[in-house]
Amino acid sequence: MNRDILTVIQENMHALSKGQKRIANYILTAYDKAAFMTASRLGKKVNVSESTVVRFAAELGYDGYPDMQKSLQKMVRSRLTSVQRIEVTNDRIGNQDLLSTVLQSDIEKIRLTLEEVDRTAFEQTVEAIVSARKIYVLGVRSSASLASFMAFYLNLIFDNVVLVPANTASEVFETLLRVGEKDTVIGVSFPRYSSRTVQAMNFASDRGAATVAITDSDASPLVPFSRYTLKARSDMVSFVDSLVAPLSLINALLVAVSRKKNDDLMHTFQSLEQIWDEYSVYEKVPE
């Protein structure tokens, strides 16, 4: 189900039982907290049984409570303000060991990404990068660090890489002005999604470029404008975006591309090592 869950609840309110209406009203007013509650905890919160919560999810057309919760969490991650994120995280973690909780969550996101990533889209993206006339990489706000990391390493492999500046909308479109069918544009965005990245991908798609979205789900606004979609699980840790899994996916993409250019890359790094040594780019560690 791709529709907004709050709309689904409102449309079905008249058909719900008294207990189910209590669940519905709580979700409508506190969806940021309800999204991360178990069925049992949500039931206790509104004084109904766990089975009533499960039947409520089925009544709305979901394949059980976990399916409804997943839909609610997707919506929540794209809507929450920073203040709401802090409140939700404090509620979720409580008195648990913070370090273990965050690191275990990141491990789980990498595991899920590995299970769910589209291998065909991955290989097609590698080919689109290797064969591109120009490679444009764009990420805004927290995703800018991922885009910058990716562009840095692609620049060591190719001489046609452009990291799209995104300080203003005009910079984005001025940089993409000559983008065309022989180019590849990679857009990186995770909740809360950047409208600037979405607009840039729309622009590039209209001009026939091979567009690649690195994002979190099929519900991402980048997907409609992307020829290839690579999904990596992300999460919110307080006001911080957890982007460990997306970074791991980008690492894999960089390695796959480098394997395609192995001979050229060896020559490039032989030259770079000489330059780095001559100009003391790296500190030499005593043996």
Image (cartoon, rainbow, N blue to C red):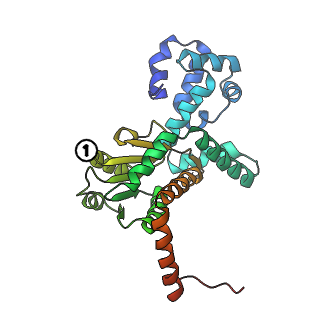
- Residue 17 versus residue 232: which sits nearer the camera? 232
Q: Is residue 248 left or right of residue 261?
A: right
Nearer to the camera, 44 or 100: 100
Q: Which residue is mark 1?
A: 206
- Residue 2 sits in which quadrant? top left
Q: Residue at x 36, y 54 (%)?
A: 131
Q: Eyeballing the image, is 88 above or below 27?
A: below
Residue pictured at 67% horizontal, 42% vertical: 92
Up-down relation of residue 119 to residue 103 (above or below) = above
Q: Quadrant of residue 158?
A: bottom left
Residue 27 drawn at (x, y percent) = 56, 29
Image quadrant holding the C terminus, namely: bottom right
Q: Position of residue 5 (x, y in %)?
A: 49, 27
Mark 1 residue element: helix
Describe residue 245's horizontal placement relative to residue 224 as left or right: right
Residue 151 at x, y = what percent? 44, 63
Amino acid at the residue labelled 1: Asp
* Residue 40 in the image: above or below residue 261: above
Quick check: 125 above or below 148?
above
> Tag 1: Cα neighbours inside 10 Å, few (<14), some, or many (≥20)?
few
Residue 184 visible in the displayed image? yes
- Count of all numbered marks drawn on residues in the image: 1
